[in-house]
Amino acid sequence: MSQRQILQVFEQYQKARTQFVQTVADLAARPQNTETLQNAGVMSLLRPLLLDAVPTIQQTAALALGRLANYNDDLAEAVVKGDILPQLVYSLAEQNTQRFYKKAAAFVLRAVAKHSPELAQAVVDCGALDALVISLEEFDPGVKEAAAWAISYIARHNAQLSQAVVDAGVVPLLVLCIQEPEIALKRVAASALSDIAKHSPELAQTVVDTGAIAHLAQMILNPDAKLKRQVFSALSQIAKHSVDVAEMVVEAEIFPATLVCLKDPDEYVRKNVATLIREITKHTPELSQIIVNVGGVAAVIDYLGDSKGNVRLPGIMMLGYVATHSENLAMAVIVSKGVSQLAICLEEEQDHHTKAATAWAFGQIGRHTPEHAKAVAVANVFPKLLNLYLDTESSEDLQAKVSLSPFLK
């Protein structure tokens, strides 16, 4: 047998591996194929291909595994039980691994971690965070983005996993990522900071201590809607925890510019802005007064008029929080025609959570003095509130909120 014939055997084997892994990756892109692939033992066949000498076979095998793990927790569990994660983590940490493979490997980690805290913990336990930190320091923005995405999916589950992410030294690198020119990387990094900050005051403080607020504040008027969604989400998750961090968010001079975004064409941008304002106003009369002074109450009332459905909820609650603090702040809501707009919300919305929040807001506005109560009475909401309280189909929460209203006492 000639040398050429011998080499031809190897070429055929490589072509067969390439064709197999490419076909499996294509099949894995369609949900209806996943059960058949799993029953055929696809996990154990893909695992050795992660170590293949041919880079394209490696990355296509990882892509196929990521697509499978992405569908449901059973397939993600199979990836964990197949002892595949340690191999991916090793490859991520290697300096000479191709960037395409690193992106695919981070995709698998993200696909496994997203399903549950237990699966995310399995990703952490195999040493993934150290490898993802190395990827965040890569030159290639695509690799950074894939790593930040995986980190975001790990952190979002609970405080313990977020703390593990923080302990790995991720937060300063994410803050560097939001300063990069690539919009997609900025989005994912802001989302990851939001997922870390949301769980506890301590985690939010860690994000604040790296200077994240100033960099997030610079992006509030970015033309990219998806980026603005994440920026306002992150600022909300930071501001909600305490007076001190809420004051730091306000001191970043995001108002009144932020109010412009209450008229953004993107519904989620508008909702996240309203949520941010709600999280700031709930803390103290002083913070509420700042929002009133920059025109925040009038802007939120306009937002309620322009919106429908559950996107109204943070705006309704914001008016309630402002009114809670003092007679003067409640009067600011009344003067800005907040009562009539809340009455429209009560009439139009069918969702019980939204109705309950509206009933609560009326209670906060009207509870201060007879003058405040009269302003609510003029809007003719008492009969509606009474009907909601007596309606057997009203949820317990809705009936409870209405029953707390001073108007039914």
Image (cartoon, rainbow, N blue to C red):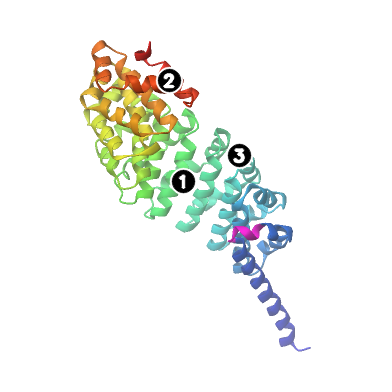
- Is residue 124 found left or right of 232 in the rendered image? right
Above or below: residue 230 compared with residue 393? below
Seen from the viewer's position, the closer of residues 32 and 81 is 32
Sooner in the amino-acid sequence: mark 3 or mark 1: 3
Q: Position of residue 286 (x, y in %)?
A: 29, 21
* Residue for badge 1: 173
Sooner in the amino-acid sequence: mark 1 or mark 2: 1
* Residue for badge 3: 117
Q: Amino acid at mark 1?
A: Leu
Query: What whole-number distance in Å separates the C-alpha atoms at marks 1 and 2?
Result: 52 Å
* Residue for badge 2: 389
> Is 33 contained in the magenta span?
yes
- Locate the N terminus by quadrant: bottom right
- Locate the C terminus by quadrant: top left
Q: Which residues are magenta?
A: 29-34
Above or below: residue 35 compared with residue 130? below
Q: Amino acid at mark 2?
A: Tyr
Q: Which residue: 39% across, 26% down?
A: 357
Assess disc 2: are there few (<14), some (14-19) or many (≥20) residues with their C-alpha within 10 Å of its C-alpha: many
Q: Position of residue 363 (x, y in %)?
A: 35, 18
Label pair 3/1, CB-CB below 8 angstroms: no
Q: Which residue: 64% across, 61% down?
A: 33
Assess disc 1: are there few (<14), some (14-19) or many (≥20) residues with their C-alpha within 10 Å of its C-alpha: some
Q: Position of residue 175 (x, y in %)?
A: 42, 44
> Is 297 contained in the magenta span?
no
